[in-house]
Amino acid sequence: MKRLFRQEADPLPASGRGYQHVCPHCRQPMTLHDLRDGDQAYWCHPCGHGHRAGDPPAEALKPLPNAG
Protein backbone atom coordinates (compact mmCIF):
# COMPACT_ATOMS: atom_id res chain seq x y z
CA MET A 1 0.00 0.00 0.00
CA LYS A 2 1.26 3.47 -0.88
CA ARG A 3 1.86 5.87 2.01
CA LEU A 4 0.32 9.35 1.76
CA PHE A 5 2.31 12.29 3.05
CA ARG A 6 1.00 15.65 4.18
CA GLN A 7 1.65 18.48 1.76
CA GLU A 8 1.65 21.31 4.35
CA ALA A 9 4.27 21.83 7.05
CA ASP A 10 3.54 20.86 10.65
CA PRO A 11 2.59 24.02 12.60
CA LEU A 12 4.23 22.71 15.79
CA PRO A 13 8.00 22.59 16.35
CA ALA A 14 9.71 19.20 16.51
CA SER A 15 10.66 19.87 20.14
CA GLY A 16 9.20 21.94 22.96
CA ARG A 17 12.68 22.99 24.07
CA GLY A 18 13.00 26.78 24.00
CA TYR A 19 9.24 27.29 24.30
CA GLN A 20 6.96 28.12 27.22
CA HIS A 21 3.48 26.63 27.40
CA VAL A 22 0.97 29.46 27.69
CA CYS A 23 -2.80 29.43 27.64
CA PRO A 24 -4.17 30.12 24.14
CA HIS A 25 -7.08 32.03 25.76
CA CYS A 26 -5.43 34.34 28.32
CA ARG A 27 -1.68 33.92 27.48
CA GLN A 28 -0.79 33.10 31.12
CA PRO A 29 1.80 30.34 31.85
CA MET A 30 0.36 26.84 32.23
CA THR A 31 1.37 24.17 34.74
CA LEU A 32 2.07 20.52 33.90
CA HIS A 33 0.01 17.85 35.68
CA ASP A 34 -0.06 14.04 35.65
CA LEU A 35 -3.41 12.52 34.68
CA ARG A 36 -4.99 9.35 36.03
CA ASP A 37 -4.55 7.57 32.70
CA GLY A 38 -0.75 8.06 32.83
CA ASP A 39 -0.68 10.96 30.37
CA GLN A 40 0.26 14.56 31.17
CA ALA A 41 -1.63 17.78 30.55
CA TYR A 42 -1.07 21.51 30.81
CA TRP A 43 -3.65 23.47 32.82
CA CYS A 44 -4.33 27.20 33.14
CA HIS A 45 -5.52 27.95 36.67
CA PRO A 46 -6.68 31.56 36.04
CA CYS A 47 -9.12 30.72 33.22
CA GLY A 48 -9.68 26.97 33.71
CA HIS A 49 -8.61 25.73 30.25
CA GLY A 50 -6.16 22.95 29.45
CA HIS A 51 -4.81 20.55 26.86
CA ARG A 52 -2.93 17.28 26.78
CA ALA A 53 0.85 17.63 26.62
CA GLY A 54 1.06 15.52 23.47
CA ASP A 55 -1.54 17.56 21.58
CA PRO A 56 -0.98 21.28 22.20
CA PRO A 57 -2.61 23.94 20.03
CA ALA A 58 -0.11 26.00 18.02
CA GLU A 59 -1.02 29.14 20.04
CA ALA A 60 0.08 27.41 23.27
CA LEU A 61 3.81 27.55 22.49
CA LYS A 62 5.54 30.90 23.08
CA PRO A 63 9.27 31.17 22.29
CA LEU A 64 11.43 31.98 25.30
CA PRO A 65 13.29 35.28 24.97
CA ASN A 66 16.69 33.76 25.81
CA ALA A 67 16.33 30.60 23.67
CA GLY A 68 18.71 30.03 20.86
Image: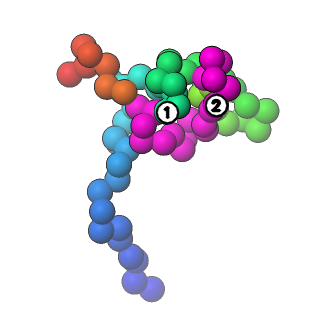
Q: Hey, which quadrant is residue 36 in on the image? A: top right
Q: In which quarter of the image is the C terminus?
A: top left
Residue 4 is situated, as x and y percent measured from the top left of the image, at 39, 76
Q: Which residue is drawn at 62% across and 32% down?
A: 50
Colour scheme: rainbow
* Sequence-first disc among 2 and 1: 1
Which stretch is magenta?
Answer: 44-61
Task: Describe the element under mark 1 as helix, strand or loop.
Answer: loop
Pointer 2 with pointer 1, Cβ within 8 A: yes
Residue 31 is situated, as x and y percent measured from the top left of the image, at 58, 19
- Count residues near mark 2 (Cα–Cα under 10 Å), then give few for <14, some for 14-19, many for 20+: some
Residue tagged by mark 2?
Answer: 49
Work out whether 46 lies above or below 48. above
* Residue 41 shows in the view: no
Residue tagged by mark 1?
Answer: 24
Q: Residue at x 56, y 35 (%)?
A: 53
Q: What residue type is labelled 2?
A: His
